[in-house]
Structures are given as C-alpha cells and as structure tokens.
Amino acid sequence: MSKGTKVPGYMQGKGSRNPRGIIGDREIRYKCSLQNTILDVLRGRPGWQEVPGQNNIQPNVNQANPKQAGSGSTTQGTTSGYKGSVRNPQGPGTQSAVPTRLQGDGDWDFYWCDREWLAQNYDTMFLYEHQKILHFRNHYELTRKNLMVKNLKRLKKQTERELGKAEGQSFEFFPTTYELPSEYHIFVEEFKKNPGIIWIMKPAARAQGRGIFLFRRLKDITDWKKGEYQPLSDPNREVPETYVVQRYIENPYLIGGRKFDVRVYVLVVSYNPLKVWLYRSGFARFSNTRFSLDSIEDTYVHLTNVAIQKNAPDYDPDKGCKWSTQQLRKYLSAKHGVEAVKKAFKGIDNIIIKSLQSVQKIIINDKHCFEMYGYDVLFDSDLKPWLIEINASPSLTASGKEDYDLKFGLLNDLLNVLDLENRLTGKEKRVGGWDLLWEDGPILADDGNMECAPNGTTASIPNSFLGCHNERKRQLRELYTAAQSIKKS
C-alpha cells in the first residue's frame, strides 16, 4: 500500500495490512492483543502474517491421561521449549503432570500479549523452540512499586555488606519509601523525625497516576492503619489497598517553571545472562501548570502523567507538553555543559542496570520471553536522576504524529533486535535506535559511534546514547548490508 493511502494508527487505531511477503522459506506468524501502534507495526512488516481468530484464547487442557493429570505430581518437561512444571488451572495448589496446550499453540511465532493473558495462560502453556512472547512470567517483581523498592533495598544491603557503604551509595536514586499498611509504624517514626516535609502516596499496582496524592499530615492517611488491631477472624475487617509512601522530591528541575519527568525505553531479552538494550529516543512529559509547593493537592502541578494532564481545564495538546529526549539533552547541554549532562545521563544508566540486577535472580528467565520496560526518571535541581517507577506495559497509543513516529520506530527496531528473520550476526551493538547497554557486563562503544561524546574524546565510553542523534533508517540499511556480507563470506 502506498504511503499516501496509509492511515496512521494514532488517528484510526488500526493500520491497513500490507500485501503478504515472504522472508526465507516461510512467513512469520504473529498474534497481537492490542489495537494501537504495535498492531500497525506488525501489519506493516514485510513477511509477517497475522494469525486469524481470537487473541485471548483460553487453555485447552490435554486430556490424554486425565487420571495422571489429577494426581498432583509434578513432571519436569523434557521437550525443547517447555518450561517445566505445570500448574493446574482448575484450582490452586494442584499441579498437572502433563503439559497443557493452547488452542492453536503452534500457529504463531510471535505474540504481543497483555499481562492478564500471560498470568492466566503461562503456567499451562507449551512453547516451541521458535516462539517469542512479550513479558516474563513474574515481571511484577520490578514493576509493582512496592516490590521494586523491596528488591532494590535488598540488593543495596547486600552490596553494602559485601563491598562497603561507599559502593552502596550507587543505589541512592530512589526516595525514602515504605509500604503501607504493613510498614505504617516504621513510617510514622520516620515522619516524626522530619516534620513539615511533603510525602507522596501511590497505589502499588495502579498506573496513569490514579490514586496518587501528596500530604503533610498523618491524619491524611489514617485509612492505611485501619484493621491493624482487629482480629483476623473479624468478618467485617476491611484490608486497605497496598500503597507505597515516598518522600516527595521538593526540588525538581524546572523548565519554564514546569515540572517534568523522562520516559526511557529499555529492552531486556535475557536475565541469565542479563542482556539489556537502551533506546535512544524517548520523551520528557511536562506538567500543564507551573510548579509550586503551595497547593500540594493540585495534581496538575505535581503529576506529569498525560492521563492526568489532559483533563486540566486549560490543557492544550498543541502547547507542547512533551519534548523529545534529543531536545531535552540539547537544552541541558547548552545550559549546563556537555560534561554535566553526560554525568546526569550516566546516572540513568546506573538506575537501569542496578534495578534489573535487583531482580535478576528472581525473575523466571525464559528464552522465549522478552520485556520492554518504560522507565520514568525525574531530575532534581542538581541534575541528579531519581527513579520514579518502571512500567511493564508503557503506553503505545500515540498522542500525535511525532509520538506515533517515535513509537512506530521504537517497536519496529525492537523486532529488528529480536531478529526472527535471522538477518543479523548476533554481535551487533546497535540496531536502529537500540544500543546494547549490558551483556553480562558493560558494553563499550565503538570508535565510530560517538555522537554525544565531546570533541577530541578518545577514551572508551559506555555504549549508551540516550537523547543522541537517532538516524535509525540509515543505520539499519548499513547494518543489514554489512551483516549480509559477513554471512555470505
């Protein structure tokens, strides 16, 4: 289909399907549970064919040996690609001795599924050698706010114990945090040590800014201590929703008097060994209202989520509530110098690696799985980066043409990294806009890949180029030409 007749996904939601194409000896078959930019990317990719039918298929229990399936025993899978013991979906605490199959489970090579589908089906699912699926089984260990902080605290303590307090300072990138109601009394002690400061309450498992509020007084959070002294057998006891309470960063870096945070995209293709890619492009999300601590109840001042800001009475989508990370890096470099910005962005690299290492031994590693995280990072007035949260399903719905182009390129390059077509050599450090940041250790940049380095730099630098120039299409052409030549030789 010609470019002139293609309707972009941010306007219509569904892209038009391109004619069928062939790569190698057969098509790559995919399923997708979302109706946004990722579906446009998949439908527009040469040689990829959508599998017809329902995406949200349910487990189809293998009835070959129903007596054995109900015996409660556990069998480790010996077939290549099978993940091991299988849980019985008919009830908790029981396990099936044989792997269950999904209807049509061999019909697809790639599945962009949602988290709910994975939670319902992963434990009863057989995956063949060639299949790839979005999300690791227990991704929530990093993306639930309370679990993220718990895992970071544990790795920090381990680091201090093994390497000393000085090394533990490399974890000083998340605010003082407590889980409520379980750590309510510990929090109260900390609260009384620092009278007058502002705290922020966040639901542990919600997204898009829902349920978040700021407070200065303990009486504003009395709901999170209810039920503590009631007996567990009390049928009327209400268990409050799990929240995290964090010390609010009262000195955020402001541009034009407005607060912002930065969305950073990270791709993990393996946890053992840890292999991490960082995307060059992202965006800064600005609040719609000038920053002030005088009105802590005004979410339009303190929360930068688009889902919140678009409801502001004077919200104007054309006003410029987003900057690209390239724009942000140029602005900060002009104001503070290249070295200061380089140090700040290096801090983001540290946040990414330390947070992933905190769950490296906990995440159920599966060679069929991959994860694209959306990191939200805030700079304070000293240009120190702070980790706000990590999203397992960052929004792929575009808010305009620039946002659509960013996300379309991001997702297309993600598929290029996964390389189901087997067109790459496997030794690449850059694929389109993705740079290999870590592979069982830090990756150093090649001499010819120094876009953000100061003039005259000759020393090796990390292969990290967040906010640097991203001429992805030209790079891809050169990459595939070089890879083809290497494979032929």
Image (spheres, rainbow, N blue to C red):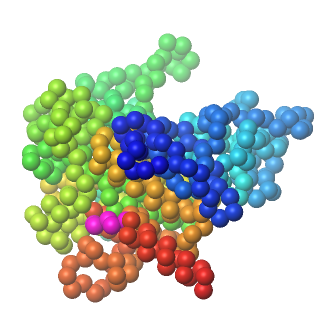
Total label count? Answer: 0
Confirm whether the magenta stretch covers residue 471. Answer: yes
Question: Residue 350: percent from the left, percent from the top?
Answer: 35, 64
Which of 181 and 112 lies nearest the eye of the viewer?
112
Q: Residue at x 56, y 82 (%)?
A: 486
Q: Residue at x 39, y 65 (%)?
A: 473
Q: Name the quadrant containing residue 52.
A: top right
- In the image, residue 240 sits, relative to residue 125, either above or below, namely above
Q: Is residue 313 visible?
A: yes
Question: Residue 472: percent from the left, percent from the top?
Answer: 37, 65
User: Is most of the magenta stretch helix, strand or loop?
Assistant: loop
Which of 232 and 320 lies nearest the eye of the viewer?
320
Q: Is residue 362 visible?
A: no
- In the image, residue 346 sits, relative to residue 251, either above or below, namely below
Question: Residue 240: percent from the left, percent from the top?
Answer: 42, 24
Describe residue 303's horizontal placement relative to residue 51 as left or right. Answer: left
Q: Residue at x 52, y 54 (%)?
A: 45
| Placement of the C terminus among the 4 image quadrants | bottom right
Q: Residue at x 38, y 70 (%)?
A: 474
Q: What span is colored magenta in the figure?
A: 468-472
Confirm whether the magenta stretch covers residue 57. Answer: no
Which of 392 and 198 lies nearest the eye of the viewer?
392
Question: Residue 192: percent from the left, percent from the top?
Answer: 22, 37
Q: Name the quadrant containing residue 304.
A: top left
